[in-house]
Amino acid sequence: DEGRITRMLDPDDVWSRLAEESIGRYGSIEDFSGVSFFNESGFVAVGRDEEGSWLRQVKDSSERRNVSRKILSGEEARSRFYPIHFPDEATVLYQKERAGHISPRKFVRASLKASEKRGADLIDEDAEAVSASASWDEEAGKGW
């Protein structure tokens, strides 16, 4: 399990926006940590553009949010993504930029390296319990 799809094309505007914010930070995290984890390979959503369908919801959300994407017919998609066969009746949403996949293992490595560079102490042991204390709660809110 070495990949997670990441894209802004989503039927839910909130998740689309959260993805946009996350993807927008990948480059700076990679640069700061020195660990590459994002492969900008694009994203393709395929389905029937019918009222209430998942694809229609994604299309509508992308229009509301002005997410850059191309709308292709099945024939256009077959030509662009040969040898994949797309049915004639398919509608294809193609997000070329700011979409692709991340390596979760490399992302964790990048996050740990970035945390260390910012002064965090990393403890490479299993947690036996987690609890909140009053002093932790008070400290956790400082600087946010």
Image (tube, grey):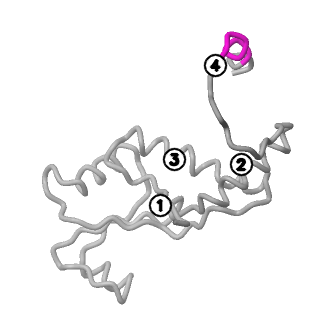
4 or 3: mark nearer the eye: 4
* Residue picked out by circle 1: 5
- Quarter of the figure that contains the C terminus: top right
Q: Check residue 20 in the rendering and tell me which mark sits there, or answer none.
A: 3
SS of the residue under disc 1: strand
- The residue positioned farthest toward the front in the image shown: 128
Camera-side mark, 4 or 2: 4
Q: Which element type, helix, strand or loop, lies under badge 4?
A: loop
Q: Which mark is residue 111?
A: 2
* Stretch in magenta: 133-139
* Residue drawn at (18%, 79%) of the image: 88
For disc 4, the marked residue is 132
Q: Is residue 140 left or right of residue 93?
A: right
Amino acid marked by disc 2? Ser
In whole angstroms, how far apart are the C-alphas of marks 2 and 3? 19 Å
What is the distance, in whole Å, between disc 1 and disc 3 at their CAs? 13 Å
Q: Main secondary structure of the magenta part?
A: helix
- Contact between marks 1 and 4 (CB within 8 A): the answer is no
Quarter assignment of residue 102: bottom right
Is 138 covered by the magenta stretch?
A: yes
Residue 20, percent across and down?
Answer: 51, 47
Q: Position of residue 39 (x, y in %)?
A: 59, 67
Q: Are marks 4 and 3 in contact (CB under 8 Å)?
A: no
Tell me what residue is drawn at x 57 percent, y 51 percent.
Answer: 23
Numbered mark located on residue 83 in the image: none
Q: For residue 21, what is the image quadrant?
A: top right
The residue furthest left is: 51
